[in-house]
Image (tube, helix red, strand yellow):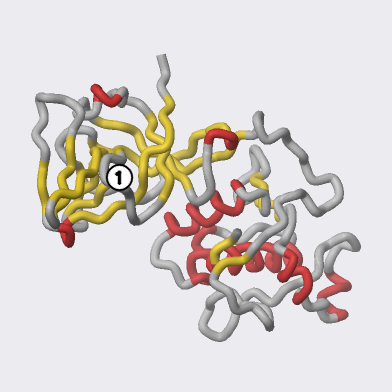
Amino acid sequence: MLTKKQYELLLFIRDRLGNTGVSPSFDEMKDALGLRSKSGIHRLISGLEERGFIRRLAHRARALEVVKLPENAIAHASTPAPAAQASMPANAPLSVPAANGSGAAATPAGFAPNVIRGNFQPSLPGAAVIAENTQSVRLPLLGKIAAGAPIEAISNPTTSVDYPASLLGRGEHFALTVDGDSMIEAGIFDGDTAIIQRCDTADSGMIVVALVDQSEVTLKRLRRKAGSIALEPANPKHETRIFGPDRVRVQGKLVGLIRKY
């Protein structure tokens, strides 16, 4: 499935490639979708890449390739004008209008749902087919997260990490570098790379990325107690912190770790 923003971004990239042969910049994509920061574009691209709709071309800046489209996008794709066809390569895909007067990516006629089902098998000739158990996905590394005293939230990607696709579930994922020792008894050590599934709710007892007071982020075990939220460490040297429910927002849950020796 694709979210509406992922769908709009996919059509915008496809339209730009079809008309110019060059991928749009992150600033252009941010402006086209009306987002405030490029970190949102990084997450959308990672989600599209994870689902097999686009592919990043190695060793080339701003190099994206559209591998396939959802079925409803193909059904509503419009044929480009003759002048546009003349300037496009013979094998270029049909152009889909990408922007409206407000600067946001255009939505084809007939598109109504907020989530779009996609066919996750490659649909273009020559598209790479990689065994599910060996495929890796590239996750944005958003910076450090405290497993100790909370640090200021970092939302801009610094680089990326590769992680086996077979170990990830559905949804968007990102990575964070663990800073601190408060979760060592849960097997999470300083310098580890935490793999996080983006979500805004979590069951009591899960290890989560928690945003406190909209300003600091920490990796702790979440406990719900009598209308309060406790963020528990896994190290007796650190204290449990308890907050009102309106002060803590879950940003994701821990689903994996990468450790280098």
Residue at 61% from the left image edge and 61% from the top image edge: 24
> From the viewer's perspective, is 168 left or right of 255?
right
Front one among 42 and 136: 136
Count of numbered labels shown in the rendering: 1
On-image quarter of the N terminus:
bottom right
Residue at 31% from the left image edge and 26% from the top image edge: 188
Residue at 58% from the left image edge and 74% from the top image edge: 113
Kindly give the residue lying farthest to the bottom in the view shown. Answer: 101
In the rendered image, the vertical position of residue 173 relative to residue 74, given as above or below: above
Front one among 240 and 82: 240
- Classify mark 1: helix, strand or loop: strand
Residue 246 figure quarter: bottom left
Kindly give the residue lying farthest to the top in the view shown. Answer: 261
Tell me the amino acid under the disc marked 1: Val
Could you tell me residue 135's position as x and y percent?
A: 65, 34
In the rendered image, the vertical position of residue 70 relative to residue 128, given as above or below: below
Label 1 Cα neighbours within 10 Å, binned few <14 / some 14-19 / many ≥20: many
Residue at 65% from the left image edge and 39% from the top image edge: 58
Could you tell me residue 96's position as x and y percent?
A: 72, 73
Q: In the rendered image, which residue does mark 1 sit on?
A: 209
